Amino acid sequence: MEKLNLFFAQIKDISFWQRLFHWRKIRNLSYDAYEELRALSKELDNNRENIDKLRNRITEISTRNENLSQKIKDIEITSARKDAQVEELNGRMREHSGTINELTKKVSAFEASKEDNVRNYNENIARLNQTKESFETERRKLNEVRLQEAAEHFEAMKRQWAEHETDVKNTIIRICDFNHVNYVDKVPFKGNPDNTIEISGEYIIFDAKSPASDDLANFPLYIKSQTESLKKYAAQDNVKKSIFLVVPTNTINVLKQLTYRMGDYDVFVITKDSLEPVILSLKKIEEYDLADKLSPVDRDSICRIIGKFAHTAKRRIQVDQFFSNEFIDIVLKSQKDLPEDLQKQVIEFEKSEKLNPPTEKRAKIISIDELQKKSEEIKAETQIRKLTAPEAGEE
């Protein structure tokens, strides 16, 4: 800047003689001034760039300052909220402090009564233990008595079972002697049944069966197996197809099945108490001697009843066959004539229907009284509903 000022000062005051004789000096000074001007210009450009940078920096700082100001406002709002929460928590703490004080008083009262409670508890436990010991002693005594009674009961049962075969044989012989029935000591067919009696030329077998041990759980299976082994007697000539197994009276309650239909023969489980009525019932056959001793009136009555049964059975079969054909024809027509959408609906209803006719239980007689009662109920129902019931003899 010094050279440039000096150059402009000399140029401003230069005279004619100085231009003529000192121009070289002035020209050299102009070169130095020019270099100094270039340096100043460059420095000016740099200062402008720095000013732009500073302006950008100021803008950035202003933006950041605004963000910081917004954050400070948010923090102040959050701080105010926190202060409100702290105040609310302080209020709750004051409430809880009152509750804690109240609970502290209760704990103190409980601690004061704890010793009395512990003392009462120990006294009650002592009395309970004493009562428990007395109860255990009584229970042991009672168990001993029950075990003794059970042992005596089982001993009596075993004695009864051991003597069952002999007892049954003596009872049958006594009944046969008193009622004039032939007791067969040695049977004329293959095998050796326990007891056999003869009525009207038929041999009737009474086999005595008793449990092999105190456990009656397997006794029903044992009786079932014995019914199958009696086939060797039923296959003999002149042996009645009704065979009796005589069991002890105190075992009958464990047998759920007392009649076995074995196809070619039947097996009936009875007790010793049932021997006399069974033998007397069988003896009734001897009084008739089949049809030879029947009077003509009795013979006609029997034939009339059998004929009526035969006609009724055939007529029922004929009616059932007629209605079966009619029902089949109706089903075929419904499948053929009904529209397809109705057929689908009919099939859905058919799937939902179920018929449960009365089941026939084995070894149970169909009661004629029940059938008559049911018939009267149906007749009364038809009269109430004003339906016409078919009279006897009408078709």
Image (spheres, helix red, strand yellow):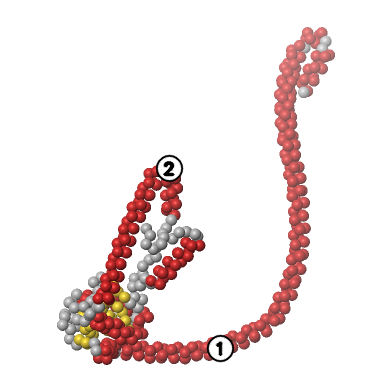
- State the residue position of label 1: 131
What residue is pinned by disc 2? 339
Q: Amino acid at mark 2?
A: Pro
Q: Label 2: state its secondary structure.
A: loop
Outermost front residue: 297
Q: Residue at x 25, y 78 (%)?
A: 295
Q: How far is disc 1 from disc 2 in space, using C-alphas?
A: 84 Å
- At 46% across and 66% down in the image, what residue appears? 377
Confirm whether residue 209 shows in the render. no
Q: Nearer the viewer, residue 205 or 316?
A: 316
Q: In this rendering, is residue 77 above or below 290?
A: above
Residue 168 placement (x, y as % from top left): 28, 88
Q: Nearer the viewer, mark 1 or mark 2?
A: 2
Q: Quadrant of residue 269?
A: bottom left
Per the rendering, the mark at residue 316 is none
Q: Residue 291: x and y, percent?
A: 23, 76
Percent x, y of residue 143 = 45, 88
Residue at 43% x, 89% y is 146
